[in-house]
Amino acid sequence: MAQGERQDDDKGLINLCGLWLQTSRAGRKYFAGRLGVGGKLMIFRNAKKKEAKDPDYYAVIGEWKQAEGGARAGRDAGEDDVPF
């Protein structure tokens, strides 16, 4: 499915991007996906959560950077305890 395309079975939801499980240099797992030309959506677990009212995850937008040779850096095919 293309970015921005509506999904008939999801009642009006619009697909922003696909997400891939990544691992940061510090070993922290997160999801990342490309948003349009030059943008990247990243979702991180809130490692500083102390109370139930604190968010479980943070979504941030950054610049899409490619590793040498055009491949994405940090790709990890392993599984994690991320509930979605």
Image (cartoon, rainbow, N blue to C red):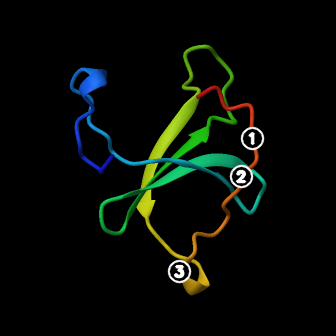
At label 2, counting other C-alpha atoms closer than 10 Å, the crowd grade (few under 14, some 14-19, many 20 or more) is: few
On the picture, is 9 further left or further right than 81? left
Q: Quadrant of the C terminus?
A: top right
Residue hosting label 1? 79
Distance from disc 1 to disc 2, alpha carbons, whole Å, reads 7 Å
At label 3, counting other C-alpha atoms closer than 10 Å, the crowd grade (few under 14, some 14-19, many 20 or more) is: few
Residue at 60% in and 85% down: 68
Residue at 74% in and 63% down: 25
Camera-side residue: 70 or 44?
Answer: 70
At label 1, counting other C-alpha atoms closer than 10 Å, the crowd grade (few under 14, some 14-19, many 20 or more) is: few
Residue hosting label 3? 70
Q: Position of residue 70 (x, y in %)?
A: 53, 80
Distance from disc 3 to disc 1, alpha carbons, whole Å, reads 24 Å
Q: Are marks 2 and 3 in contact (CB under 8 Å)?
A: no
Camera-side residue: 75 or 27?
Answer: 75
On the picture, is 80 further left or further right than 34? right
Q: Position of residue 72 (x, y in %)?
A: 58, 69
Residue type highlighted by circle 1: Glu
Label ID, residue 77: 2
